[in-house]
Image (cartoon, grey):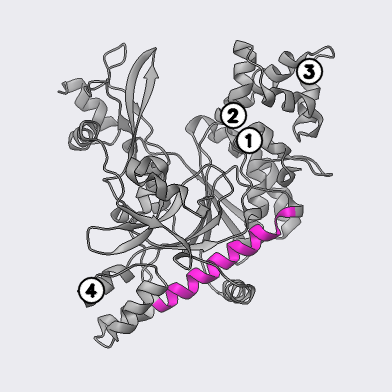
């Protein structure tokens, strides 16, 4: 199947022929659907924390000493979808309600002063829109992190700046705020230039020091593209085509973070200073709850290793607190295996029709049932009614504990589900192809973690999926 030149190309990416052959076999077989049992809901997998318990969790996190904390922000995505309707208007003349909303409210966008400075005085709507996505602001080729989101009296902020502000509010440890951004190689210089200018300003404002780091998606996580008949897709020069394997590949980047607690949040899910209170509070709530669960899990692990554990007490903790339903024949070995896993607490917001995956109970090969974040593409057609019954959905609001009881770090690559993934139809050079994505970072890439879902307010969720979302109250 592969030529000597192919083998050299595969090796140069850090891949093996066996790995590429497995990818091709995935195209042929397809990925199995998740064994979804039911949607998680309040009192059945989604914890609803009262104010007293929330206060206690915040206090536990605030009082913790010596924690290594990192805020991990996937920021590699381009803003293509955000400006899709604008491109259609400029390139094809298609004008819908979104363009009317944009042009009728242009002065309300935080980027308006920048845009006005590059517009000719007689600019019509098409010229205006073209200046947003093309020559002018050039947002059509920039990542979301470098788009101006919010206006303030002292000056507008881009999305990446709001993560600096957030980080100072809940991720400072010993006066240092560590933030890690995953970026595309072509945009890294843009992030570095902006942050080198802005970081000193926010350090002075908040009295902290920022430790900013970057990584890019590794070529070794790319997947081969195939033709519709599942043979390797070859480019005009005869070489194989490899494609980034989606955000699930970022488990490799996350695995290299050395920290006790990692906060994960998407680059576009930010709000303004005036409305940031619930976000900060519930980030600390999740972190405090995680610390409490870890403390008890570690104590049970030590008791099991010493042969002093009450197995019924351990099982009750696993089922009630870690949300893992155990089989009737559970034993000490299974309990230990369940306890000795990375743990994530995931904020879940009430379902108000926003797109995104949802919280579900899933049956596992070891006889347990556990909580998973599932996308619609992972659910069999016969089970789709379960997704419609979900009371909550996933806003990508995770707090992760990635250390073992002995202080060593988990190898997160050992806790993925390689049997999950996505196959989609794409094109290259006008030719149709099939592409494969790894299991999503908070889907299959964390499938074997202990997962706890917590109800959080909708005020903590303010994503910008299309540019008109910047007109929502959370961004004004």
Q: Is residue 441 visible?
A: no
Q: Which residue is mark 4?
A: 328
Q: Is residue 212 magenta?
A: no
Residue tagged by mark 3?
119
Say which label, 4 or 2, has the lower sequence index: 2
The residue at the point 63 percent across, 49 percent down is 163
What residue sits 26% from the left and 14% below the top? 238
Q: In the picture shown, does residue 109 fall above or below 388?
A: above
Contact check, label 2 and label 1, Cβ < 8 Å: yes
> What whole-number distance in Å separates the C-alpha atoms at marks 3 and 1?
20 Å
Q: Are marks 3 and 1 in contact (CB under 8 Å)?
A: no
Q: Secondary structure at mark 1?
A: helix
For marks 4 and 1, give the CA distance.
Answer: 53 Å
Q: Position of residue 466 (x, y in %)?
A: 62, 33
Instruction: Give the mark nearest the N terminus, 4 or 1.
Output: 1
Left/right of residue 304 with respect to residue 292 in the rendered view: left
Instruction: Give whichever of 346, 369 is nearer the camera.
Output: 369
9 to the left or right of 195: left
| Mark 3 or mark 1, earlier in chain | 3
Q: CA distance from mark 3 to mark 2?
A: 19 Å
Give whichever of discs 4 and 3 has the lower sequence position: 3
For disc 2, the marked residue is 142
Q: Residues within 10 Å of mark 2 (few under 14, many from 20)?
A: some
Magenta residues, as a range?
Answer: 275-296
Please tell me how crowded label 4 is: few (under 14), some (14-19), or many (20+) other residues with Cα within 10 Å. few
- On the image, which quarter does residue 142 sit in? top right
Of circles 4 and 3, which is in front?
4
- Reading the image, the residue beneath label 1 is 146
């Amino acid at each position: 199947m592969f030529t000597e030149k192919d083998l050299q190309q595969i090796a140069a990416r850090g891949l093996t022929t066996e790995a590429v052959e497995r990818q091709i076999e995935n195209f042929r077989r397809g990925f199995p659907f998740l064994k979804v049992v039911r949607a998680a809901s309040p009192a059945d997998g989604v914890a609803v924390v009262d104010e007293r318990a929330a206060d206690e969790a915040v206090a536990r996190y605030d009082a913790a000493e010596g924690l290594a904390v990192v805020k991990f922000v996937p920021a590699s995505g381009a803003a293509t979808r955000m400006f899709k309707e604008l491109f259609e208007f400029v390139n094809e003349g298609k004008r819908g309600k979104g363009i009317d909303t944009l042009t009728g409210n242009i002065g309300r966008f935080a980027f308006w002063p920048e845009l006005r400075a590059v517009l000719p005085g007689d600019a019509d709507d098409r010229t205006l829109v073209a200046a947003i996505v093309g020559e002018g602001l050039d947002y059509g080729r920039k990542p979301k992190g470098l788009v101006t989101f919010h206006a303030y009296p002292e000056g507008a902020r881009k999305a990446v700046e709001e993560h600096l502000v957030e980080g100072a509010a809940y991720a400072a440890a010993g006066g240092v705020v560590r933030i890690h951004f995953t970026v595309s190689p072509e945009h890294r210089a843009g992030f570095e230039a902006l942050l080198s200018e802005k970081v000193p300003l926010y350090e002075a404002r908040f009295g902290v020091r920022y430790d900013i780091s970057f990584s890019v998606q590794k070529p070794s996580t790319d997947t081969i593209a195939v033709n519709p008949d599942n043979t390797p897709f070859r480019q005009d020069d005869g070489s194989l085509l490899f494609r980034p394997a989606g955000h699930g590949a970022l488990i490799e980047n996350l695995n290299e973070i050395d920290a006790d607690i990692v906060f994960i949040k998407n680059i576009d899910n930010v709000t303004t200073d005036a409305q940031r209170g619930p976000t900060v509070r519930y980030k600390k709530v999740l972190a405090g709850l995680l610390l409490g669960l870890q403390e008890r899990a570690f104590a049970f692990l030590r008791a099991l290793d010493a042969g002093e554990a009450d197995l019924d007490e351990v099982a009750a903790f696993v089922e009630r607190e870690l949300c893992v339903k155990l089989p009737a024949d559970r034993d000490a070995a299974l309990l230990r295996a369940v306890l000795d896993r990375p743990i994530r607490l995931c904020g879940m917001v009430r379902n108000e029709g926003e797109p995104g995956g949802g919280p579900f109970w899933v049956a596992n090969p070891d006889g347990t049932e556990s909580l998973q974040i599932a996308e619609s593409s992972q659910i069999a057609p016969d089970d789709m009614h379960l997704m419609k019954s979900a009371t909550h959905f996933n806003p990508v609001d995770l707090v992760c504990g990635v250390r073992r009881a002995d202080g060593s770090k988990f190898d997160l690559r050992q806790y993925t589900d390689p049997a999950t993934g996505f196959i989609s139809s794409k094109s290259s050079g006008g030719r149709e192809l099939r592409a494969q994505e790894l299991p999503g970072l908070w889907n299959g890439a964390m499938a074997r973690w202990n997962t706890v879902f917590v109800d959080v307010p909708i005020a903590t969720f303010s994503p910008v999926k299309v540019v008109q979302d910047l007109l929502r109250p959370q961004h004004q």
